[in-house]
Amino acid sequence: MRATVIHAPFDVRLEELPDPKIEGPGDAVVKVVASCICGSDLWPYRGEPPVKQPRPIGHEFVGIVQEVGSDVRTVKAGDFVVAPFVVSDGTCPHCLAGYQTACDNVIGYGGGKADGGQGEYVRLPYADGTLVATPELPDDALVPSLLTLSDVMGTGWHAARCARVKAGDTVVVVGDGAVGLCGVLAASRMGAARVVALSRHEPRQKLAKEFGATDIISERGDAAKDAVLELTKGVGADAVLECVGTAQSMTTAFDVARPGATVGFVGVPHGVEVPISRMFGRNIGLSGGGAPCRAYLPDLMNDVLAGEINPGKVFDSELPLADVAEGYAAMHERRAIKVLLRP
């Protein structure tokens, strides 16, 4: 099969790898229908952390089950499935509590991340605890939105949930990538009265408004803080979604949070220090981490299939898998919000 392999910074290649096979009774082999490039894939693409040896990459995909192990009960050959970006067994205490990203039983399986999704086939262990099947084969027009449930829509939802967004809130979303845009959609759907998107890019601003943003702020740093305070008459935001993971984005998140607010963070942290003294002095909370997309998947899938949300609009570029290197370059250079790949 063909699969994407990262070799070094700015060096991804489509290569021939052995076809995956069932290795254990809980496994499933899935033929990829669509996959995509994640913002977190860009960190190793840029050399953070360094790539020590070539490895398959890609953790967001949907596809058709080809074969299952003897113990698999919840999916079968022929099912269309969404694969959350982290593998989970679904039975450990953390999975049962809704935090599948901390599954006790996937240690050793790449930390749980289902790498290899930017290819033609993927073998997944713990199929029953991981994969979620649609009731029937979906229309192709729904595939992009279903694909977002693998990561970015669930991650945006997690940011809003961790920030404790409630009806009537003023919410600020820091970050205008696919996760931030899905965070806008999540906050709006949770009933926020005002959703402020921080974005400097016109196509992303337009999509943020489609997803429910009531205000756009194009400034950064202190200027962004001043703009939010002006919008809120000096009060600040009731909830803040931090969807980037840099020191600047986290600083901005706390700068715009009102006393008693919570910052929901889902950006993979790089060089971030938490302002614990400010949090104490202003009673600002911090909650978040790797999104347990598997926990949110059934409800979000129902919303997609019912036509109530269309998060697939975050894909503004679709390429054949053969052009995966161009997809990485386009996202790195911010020529694309998110790239969908078709084998």
Image: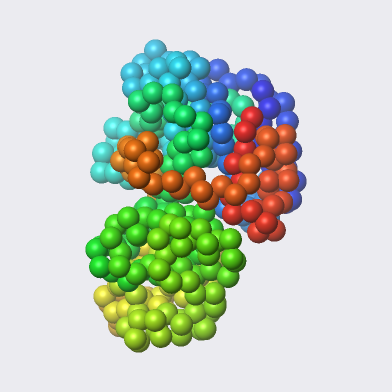
Horizontal side of residue 114 vs 15, given as left or right: left
Image coordinates of residue 20 in percent, x first then y, are: 58, 21
- Residue 51 left/right relative to 188: right
- Depth order, front residue of 170/42: 170
Give residue 194's quadrant in the image.
Answer: bottom left
Q: Quadrant of the C terminus?
A: top right
Instruction: Report the residue at 44% width, 54% height from top.
Output: 182
* Residue at 59 percent of width and 65 percent of height: 202
Left/right placement of residue 101 relative to residue 205 reads: left
On the image, the x and y values in percent for residue 324 come to 69, 40
- Residue 213 in view here: yes
Residue 112: tell me if it is visible.
Answer: no
Q: Compared with residue 154, is residue 71 higher up or lower down, i.e. above or below? A: above
Q: Is the residue 331 above or below the residue 25 in the image?
A: below
Residue 69 appears at what percent x and percent y?
43, 15
How are the colours assigned in the image?
rainbow
